[in-house]
Amino acid sequence: MPTTSKELFLKYGIPSLAILVIAIQFFFIKTQQLNQWKGGGYGMYTKIHFYYNQIYIPDISVDSLADNNNGIKNAFRMLKIMPNDANFYKAAQLVLKATDKDSVHLQLWEPSVNSSNGTYSRVLINEIHLKNQDL
């Protein structure tokens, strides 16, 4: 009995599409520094939500910067979601333009919980040192 194209699509097409989406997700996690929460949530329960990542800039109040400047607020949000080099550079540029500093040192820290011994700490994800002359 010949199989119809609908049966072939259901049997091979949909599983192939699902595998392709998963492969693309893992590719972006490894190459674009996306976290597991983006792109379908594969592995989203393996890490603490990116919302709790902390942006730290020495001698500058990050909260005040974000409250007073929507561009910086959006850049910080994107930096927490996708902590890649391009987003670090964009956020550091905006901070330099908004402040009277000669340089900025921007860091992104991720909370880390060790359930076996009950300790809570932070881990540095990435950082950038940007000077006004680098713009």
Image (cartoon, helix red, strand yellow):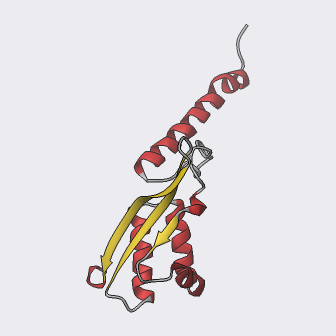
Question: Considering the image in quadrants, where does the N terminus appear?
Answer: top right
Q: Which quarter of the picture shows residue 85?
A: bottom left
User: Which residue is the extreme one toward the left?
Assistant: 133
Task: State the image coordinates of residue 95 (x, y, percent, origin top left).
Answer: 44, 82
Whether 1 is drawn above or below 15: the answer is above
Q: Position of residue 7 (x, y in %)?
A: 72, 21
Asked if residue 90 is positioned above or below residue 52 in the image, the reply reads below
Q: The C terminus lies in which quarter of the figure? A: bottom left
**View extreme (top): residue:** 1
Residue 100 image offset from top left, x and y in percent: 38, 92
Residue 105 horizontal side relative to residue 62, left or right: left
Query: Residue 131, percent across and down?
Result: 29, 80
Q: Nearer the viewer, residue 104 or 24?
A: 104
135 vs 100: above or below: above
Residue at left offset 42%, top offset 89%: 99
Quarter of the image for residue 81 reads bottom right
Label count reads: 0
Residue 108 found in image quarter: bottom left
Residue found at the far front of this picture: 117
Residue 56 in the figure: left or right of residue 44: left
Residue at the image position 59 percent from the left and 49 percent from the top: 39
